[in-house]
Image (cartoon, helix red, strand yellow):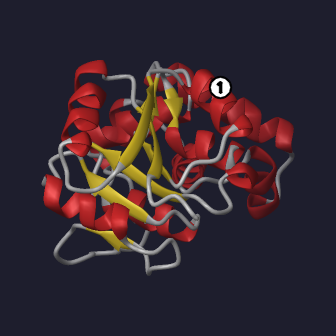
């Protein structure tokens, strides 16, 4: 007889939040077997060895981009429902999640009832987000001129920032802009230096906090 207990894996480096989420789910009428991780490497190691019905992931885990973690685990999550649960609730991130084949994109303020409904949806259900109206504006809208000027970003650097946030690799960016990968990597280092950030996860956070997208 097949088990009706859903196996849920949570990856979030905010321990109080993940502990509270675990307790909340355990109190529901549904049967869940829950394991949580506060760092991406432990989570990755577990999911490469064990199946999960549901994977709930934050977007910024120990300074790692949650999208990167999901991409790295994609072959291990073929039959797993993937839910992003994040404080970074922006249109371009929702669009990126949907295009990546992620099942749901939810804000951390989501009510327990709604989260459980999403968990209980079939794995092949349509993409879900709890935004009332998805305003999928053009992902490549202009970066705010004032902010770009403040940090002395060139037109090429602004374009590359958009492509990085859209999930493009250096190789893909090079092909799209008809430049070498080495040139792209140089631009990325210059962007990190000018904005004083270290990786793509920090770039997404910076874009949100500084309203880079108008």
Q: Residue drawn 58% across and 29% down? A: 43
Residue 24 drawn above or below residue 199: below
Q: Residue drawn 82% across and 60% down? A: 175
Count of numbered marks: 1
Locate the C terminus by quadrant: bottom left
Residue 184 drawn above or below residue 30: above
Q: Secondary structure at mark 1?
A: helix
- Mark 1 — residue? 189
Q: Does the rendering let one see residue 152?
A: no
Q: Residue furthest front?
A: 1
Residue 182 drawn above or below residue 104: above
Choose top left, top right, bottom left or bottom right for residue 126: bottom left
Q: Residue drawn 49% across and 62% down? A: 96
Q: Position of residue 176 (x, y in %)?
A: 75, 63
Looking at the picture, tell me which residue is in the foreground, 6 or 206: 6
Looking at the picture, tell me which residue is in the foreground, 56 or 101: 56
Q: How dense is the environment of label 1, judged by Cα within 10 Å: few (below 14), some, or many (20 and up)?
A: some
Answer with left or right where residue 125 lies relative to residue 211: right
Q: Residue drawn 30% across and 30% down? A: 18
Locate the N terminus by quadrant: bottom right
Q: Does the rendering let one see residue 191?
A: yes
Choose top left, top right, bottom left or bottom right for residue 139: bottom left
Q: Position of residue 88 (x, y in %)?
A: 30, 45
Looking at the picture, tell me which residue is in the foreground, 198 or 4: 4
Answer with left or right where residue 48 lies relative to residue 3: right
Looking at the picture, tell me which residue is in the foreground, 5 or 19: 5
Q: Position of residue 77 (x, y in %)?
A: 65, 54
Answer with left or right where residue 137 lies relative to residue 155: left
Q: Position of residue 156 (x, y in %)?
A: 61, 49
């Amino acid at each position: 007889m097949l088990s009706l207990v859903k196996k849920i894996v949570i990856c979030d480096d905010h321990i109080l939040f993940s502990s509270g989420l675990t307790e909340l789910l355990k109190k529901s009428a549904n049967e869940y077997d829950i394991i949580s991780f506060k760092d991406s490497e432990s989570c990755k190691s577990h999911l490469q060895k064990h199946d999960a019905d549901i994977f709930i992931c934050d977007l910024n885990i120990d300074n790692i981009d949650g999208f990167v973690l999901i991409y790295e685990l994609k072959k291990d999550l073929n039959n797993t429902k993937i839910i992003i649960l994040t404080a970074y609730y922006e249109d371009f991130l929702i669009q990126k999640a949907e295009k990546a084949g992620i099942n749901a994109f939810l804000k951390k303020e989501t009510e327990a009832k709604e989260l459980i409904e999403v968990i209980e949806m079939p794995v092949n259900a349509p993409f879900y987000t709890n935004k009332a109206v998805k305003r999928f504006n053009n992902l490549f809208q202009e970066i705010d001129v004032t902010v770009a000027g403040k940090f002395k970003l060139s037109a090429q650097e602004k374009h590359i920032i958009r492509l990085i946030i859209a999930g493009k690799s250096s190789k893909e960016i090079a092909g799209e802009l008809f430049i070498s990968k080495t040139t792209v990597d140089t631009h990325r280092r210059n962007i990190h230096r000018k904005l004083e950030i270290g990786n793509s996860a920090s770039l997404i956070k910076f874009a949100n906090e500084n309203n880079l997208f108008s």
